[in-house]
Amino acid sequence: MAEMWVNMGPQHPFNHGLWNLRVLMDGETIKYAEPILGYLHRGWEKSMENRTYPQIIPLSDRLCYGSSMSWSHLYCMTMEELFDIEVPERGEYIRVIVLELQRIVSHLLWLMAFGVDLGNLTVMLYVIREREMFLDLLQSITGARMTYNYPRIGGVRNDLPPDFERDCIRAMDYFQGKIDDYEKLCDGSKIFRMRTEGLGVVKPADAINLGLTGPNLRASSVDVDIRRDDPYSVYEEFDFDVCTHDACDTYARYRVRMDEMRVSCDIVKQALEKIPDGPVRVKVPKNAPNKTAVARVEDPRGEGMMYVVGDGTDKPYRLSVRSPVFVYVSAANHMLKGHKIADVPSVMGSIDMCLGETDR
Amino acid sequence: MELYTFIEGIVVWLVSIVQYILNVIGLHGLADWLGGAEIVNILTYLGQALIVFLVGFVICLTMIWQERKTLGRLMDRRGTRIGPLGYAQQLADGFKTFLKEIIVPDKAWVSGYNWALIILIASSVILVGIIPLSDGWFLSSTPAGLLLLFAVFSLAPFAILIGGWASNNKYTLIGGMRSAAQLISYEVPLLLSTVGVILLAGSLSFGDIVAAQDTIWFVIPQIIGFIIFMIAMNAEVERIPFDLPEAEAELVEGWGTEYGGLRFGLIMFAEYLRGYAGAAIAAILFLGGWNGPYLPPELWLLIKVFIIFFVFIWIRGSFPRVRTDQILNIGWKWLMPLAMINLAIAVAFKMLGWF
């Protein structure tokens, strides 16, 4: 067969959102892959300049509904940097708890999509079942199930509900057994290993050059985690492992996320043990000082970063976002070249696409 | 009682009623013509065809229902809930496809687009006629029944390739190519795995093969052949993990992307008919066919068919999809040599005089 261009997208079952992957194929082999973005562009950064600081929080949830908590947390953290305020310790602990719950939810959402990409619907339905449990927990704190609008500049909106600690620990214990089930269903299947091992290999040096962060970078055996290396909130209080894997392939990315869910359970348990009493929120001034601030966070997908310029008014002069997946899509060609077209969903699915934060 | 005799009795009874009415009216010539042997014969065959088609249709509906219910249990959800035990959902879905608009893609090769579908569905419906439910229940019985069955069975890749090409869509083209590669390469181990059974039974006729399993089912001496047959048949009927031609994650819906509405419904119908055919061949060749105590033989065959189909559903519920090169590797590098070994075992049994 001669070479031919195939558009995987903008509407295609494998891309979870609107983007286009133009693939040059020779038969079924990929010779070149070219990601095209811009189908979902909302002008997020520009519209923020017309809103006051508290009004931005609900929109920062919408950056990625898969991990809305960590994005609004990142926004609030940047603003605390700008206003130079200190969050009460109980507020920080609650933030860590909800962030780790959000990380589990996000990884479960990823595993669901990955199962569908590989053609195994059972994974999807099992994972959705357990995700409900965590959504219930988050709902009991925040009242919402997807876009939580929970962190506030200077703390969080409200305290933990009564009985939360009991429910949460019970859910964690139950869930750690369920991860074993997923591993039996996925790792135990020869076909799953055939479809993931040795695919989309990114060597450590390439991963750093391509700008991969988060689980994808750790799957390339680079031991970097912002939670440990540049701790924010109260992460330095906890003792947790940073999961890495040496295989650098799609299977390694799957493996790292599964391990991270276990670690997140561990962190939540530690946080629930250590959580102190006290207020969860402090008062903040209305107008920002005339300076800039930057903060970064370990999003479930990688390194999220926000940069804000305050000009003395109640609205930001400029607000800019560095989103992890926007960098990942440029690695598409590096990861896909030479593979078959059937590997596009499994390889691109393994980097955990989220188009809301990518296109903004 | 044979199906033919049974339907002939009904036809003769109906014809005699009509003859009586015609004689009362005074149309004696027409009544005599209607009572002739040829007309009764033709009407009997028509009735037989109708009954076999209806049986195929009901089996197909039941298989869809079984698939939905079993997958529901495997995936920890309910499956269908409309009607008694959720059975009416299939009828509702079938009715829904009637209401959809039929769209032919722009710049498609229309005659190829339509004929591919016709060949696929016709060949699938013929399968139900060829497969006997018992030694009395069949539409056509030839000494080379198995050969005829596989000949009709292997018409599908041709139709799928043409359909994928004619739809004028890159996904369907890739799906059609994949389907051709997959189905053709799996025909070989599929046929080779049945050769052992044919050798042991010494016949290509379904009746003889089932009769030869009176004492022992062929699944015991031909266990390797049975496993190869199940894997290859899973690939032939395009079910997960071998559903590459319609892999919805990478090729949207593969070669069937452009077939919408009723055409899609018919494709699904044909797919389940092929699934039924595959399970029925497995039951007849390896699991003793309609042999069994107490129950009527037709029921025994259907029970075995649904058990085998359950295995297909189970596999679907627990495996992801394989890749194009991997499926060809499995077919040529593993199943082919294994089928050869299986054939050698069958030859050894035959030479030892055990069968």
Image (cartoon, coloured by chain):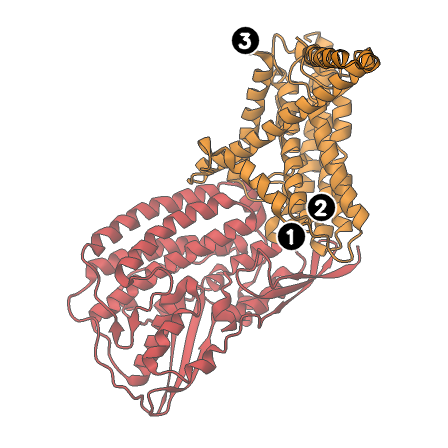
Chain colours: A red, B orange
Question: Of marks 1 and 3, which one's residue comes earlier in the chain?
Answer: 1
The residue indicated by pointer 1 is B251
Query: For the residue carrying disc 3, how many other residues have a C-alpha within 10 Å: few (<14), some (14-19), or many (20+)?
Result: few
- The answer to whether one can see residue B252 in this image is yes
Marks 2 and 1, Cα distance to the nearest angstrom? 11 Å
Q: Quadrant of residue A147?
A: bottom left
B269 to the left or right of A146:
right
Asked whether the residues under the numbered discs 1 and 3 touch, taking CB atoms below 8 Å apart as contact, a structural biologist would say no
Percent from the top left, x then y, of residue A152? Answer: 29, 74
User: Which residue is most to the front?
Assistant: B25
Residue B140 shows up from this direction = no
Is mark 2 in CB contact (under 8 Å) with mark 1?
Answer: yes
The one of B112 and A56 positioned closer to us in this rendering: B112
Q: Residues within 10 Å of mark 1 (few under 14, many from 20)?
A: many
**Left or right: residue B109 compared with residue B103:** right
Question: Gap in Å between the C-alphas at discs 1 and 3?
Answer: 47 Å
The structure residue drawn at horizontal position 30% and vertical position 80%, both measured from the top left corner, is A80
Q: Where residue B178 is drawn, which disc sits there?
A: 2
Label 3 or label 2, whichever lies nearer to me, is 3
Q: Position of residue A221 (x, y in %)?
A: 48, 61
Disc 1 residue type? Leu
| Residues beneath discs 1 and 3 located on the same chain | yes
- The answer for which chain carries disc 2 is B
Q: Give me the disc on residue B293.
A: 3
- Of the residues shown, which amino acid type is indicated by label 3? Pro
Q: Residue at x 44, y 58 (%)?
A: A244
Of the two numbered discs 3 and 2 on the same chain, state the one appearing first in sequence: 2
Q: Which label number is shown at residue B108? A: none
**Residue in the picture at 75% in, 18% down:** B43
Image position, residue B238 (x, y; %)? 65, 39
